[in-house]
Image (tube, grey):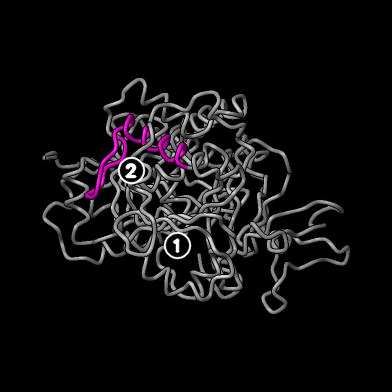
Amino acid sequence: MVVRTSSYAPPPQVGDAAKTAQRDWLRALDSIAPIAAEPQRLLLHVIEDLARASPGAPGLISSIESFTYGALAARANAYARWAIAQRIAESEIVCLMMPNQPEYLAVWLGLSAIGIVVALINTQLRGSSLAHCIDTAAPTHMIVAAEFSDRLQSSAASLKTRPRIWSHGASDAFERIDQAVAGFSGSALSASERRSVTIADRALLIYTSGTTGLPKAANVSHRRVLLWSFWFAGLINTGPRDRIYNCLPMYHSIGGIVATGAALVRGGSVLIRDKFSAQQFWDDIADGGCTIFQYIGELARYLVNAPPHPREREHLLRLACGNGLRGDVWEKFQARFAVPRILEFYASTEGNFSLYNVEGRVGAIGRVPSFLRHRFPLALVKFDEEGGAPVRGTDGLCVRCLSGEVGEALGRIRGGSSGVGSEFEGYSEAAQSEQKILCHVFEKGDAWYRTGDLMRVDESGFYYFVDRVGDTFR
């Protein structure tokens, strides 16, 4: 049990913050540098290497089950062999609908490592919305936790596709995948079992809401999985002694990849909870020895508004990392709970650029230092709210915003890049991808990704989120 009480230190002075930020940026860049040089090295292979070095090191921890690095690698390999036995081919899609737990990661790590695309289904969906997401993926197989079996059956009448359904846990309706997988070896795949999968191949489908209100399936390659994991590992400097607290949904990119991958690629561990509980939060953080908390802004607001907890300063947190933290909540959260540092960032699953507030400027979502502007091709353009589109001048090109002006954020698309940003992988449906691309923005023939987010930038280069375009919010 953790007994040391955290001591809160005020944010560093401007000069110190700038030096710290530069170190963080350079560390992140160094962290992702080897990815392109080893195109057949996937996230599972990184975990396997760590498992060989320290098989008993804790990896994923939950109240349901816990996996050491060795157990996680073995379980993922067993799922890969199960899929091979089922003759599930490369590029075929398997839907996964399970609550937050270590097994969840083992499933998609194993399947994606042999070229199968795993569609991560939102566990909150029901009826026609659930059927829509399954049909969008058009899977040949679906793995569903037993607790969601009834919900899936009630949506069956609306389904156009007919995947073979496997239940994880006891079910009267479907075959038991947990029992089937138990019969397969967890040793590393042999050369004959491995498939020619590279970082350019699609690994996941992650659903994101657009202005239509219907979930869209965003393509996520193995490259993006590795970039997200290693970039955040470098940016927040994770190591074997770090433990990330993750209560965000694992069917989303932050809870499912960033919060887990940032720890796992550096030998750290993840404490997984199925959902957030303000009452239980500080006991989990203290008892679990967590050093990093992955948040969304609403969670911080709930904690600030909650009654005092006897252990709210009895923790080892060194960092809270996330997005959507309002300035007024930020300062109250950091001071009340003695969290030494907050790293706010802006990103989206399908987006082709990100912003990081490494300096800790309260209320800002980040900035792009001059030496990284070529990697984060970002622009704000004036937006016509009535017309629902960016403003164009007499030359037919978009109009850049000045400092302090609100406009839509765009990210320039440069296909084939292996860097942090610029490549737009799009959605499973080509028409949806085309709707997010804006052409002839600043010159004839250029193409930019439309975020649908309105922002402003100050004279120091810090960006601030203002609103969403349309009828949804981020």
Residue 401 visible in the snapshot:
no
Q: Which residue is mark 1?
A: 122
- Mark 2 surroundings within 10 Å by alpha-carbon count, few (fewer than 14), some (14 through 19), many (20 or more): some
Q: Which residue is mark 2?
A: 319
Residue 39 lies in the magenta-colored region = no
Residue 22: where, in percent of width, then height? 50, 33
* SS for callout 2: strand
Name which residue lies at 65% across and 63% down: 408
Mark 1 vs mark 2: in front = 1
Q: Amino acid at mark 1?
A: Asn
Name which residue lies at 56% across and 51% down: 93
Q: Are marks 1 and 2 in contact (CB under 8 Å)?
A: no
What range of the chain is rendered magenta?
59-82
Vertical position of residue 451 compared to residue 103: above or below: below
Q: Amino acid at mark 2?
A: Leu
Residue 110: where, in percent of width, then height? 46, 39
View extreme (bottom): residue: 386
